[in-house]
Amino acid sequence: MVTKGKELEYDSTLIFINNIDLSRNSLMGEILDELTGLVGLGTLNLSMNHLTGNVLKNIGNLRWLETLDLSKNRDGTSALTIIGGSVEDEQNGDDYEKLWLYASIGLGFVVGFWGVCGTLLLKKSWRHGYFICRMISKIELH
């Protein structure tokens, strides 16, 4: 392993590895169960490979894991899921997040627009006040 210019070789001290980047290695098949034995692992990047199947049931053993990247597996589509976990399939999760984002933007626009315009239409005193302010600002500009 080469980190910051230092070349390190691990054989019997694998438990001390805290960063594994195996992205873009054309790895195929399922993730090996032995990875959960690396309890000190903080970053695991398995993106852009051809991995399929489920994420390991014992992934919770990796107490120090902060970053887990399983994106773009199986020819650009995500085929990995966490069993009994809280993470959905990444592609479907992104689609739902985009849908909620667009729905929220649309709803926010409608509520904001009709909150202002509806009030001006329904409350005569506000409507008169708004147009009087507009007339005064136009007079001051000239």
Image (tube, rainbow, N blue to C red):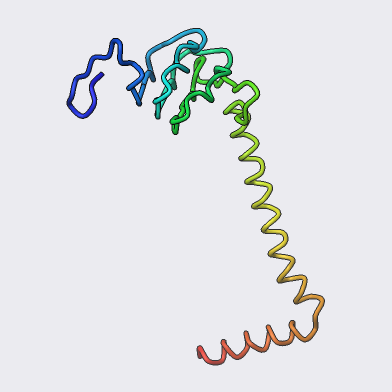
Q: Return the x and y of residue 50 as percentages of the image width and height.
A: 48, 12
Measuring 63% from the left and 88% from the top, which residue is drawn there?
135
Among the 4 quarters of the image, the one containing residue 5:
top left
Q: Return the x and y of residue 132 as percentages of the image width and height.
A: 67, 89
Measuring 27% from the left and 14% from the top, which residue is drawn there?
10
- Residue 33 to residue 66: above or below: above
- Residue 136 to residue 42: above or below: below
Say left or right for 5 vs 110: left
- Residue 56 to residue 29: above or below: below
Which residue is at the front of the view, 18 or 86?
18
Measuring 47% from the left and 25% from the top, which residue is drawn there?
62
Which residue is at the front of the view, 138 or 113?
113
Q: Quadrant of the N terminus?
A: top left
Q: Return the x and y of residue 90 as percentages of the image width and height.
A: 57, 28
Q: Return the x and y of residue 24 as percentages of the image width and height.
A: 38, 18
Measuring 73% from the left and 71% from the top, which residue is drawn there?
117
- Residue 11 to residue 120: above or below: above
Among the 4 quarters of the image, the one containing residue 134:
bottom right
Among the 4 quarters of the image, the one containing residue 118:
bottom right
Say left or right for 20 vs 3: right
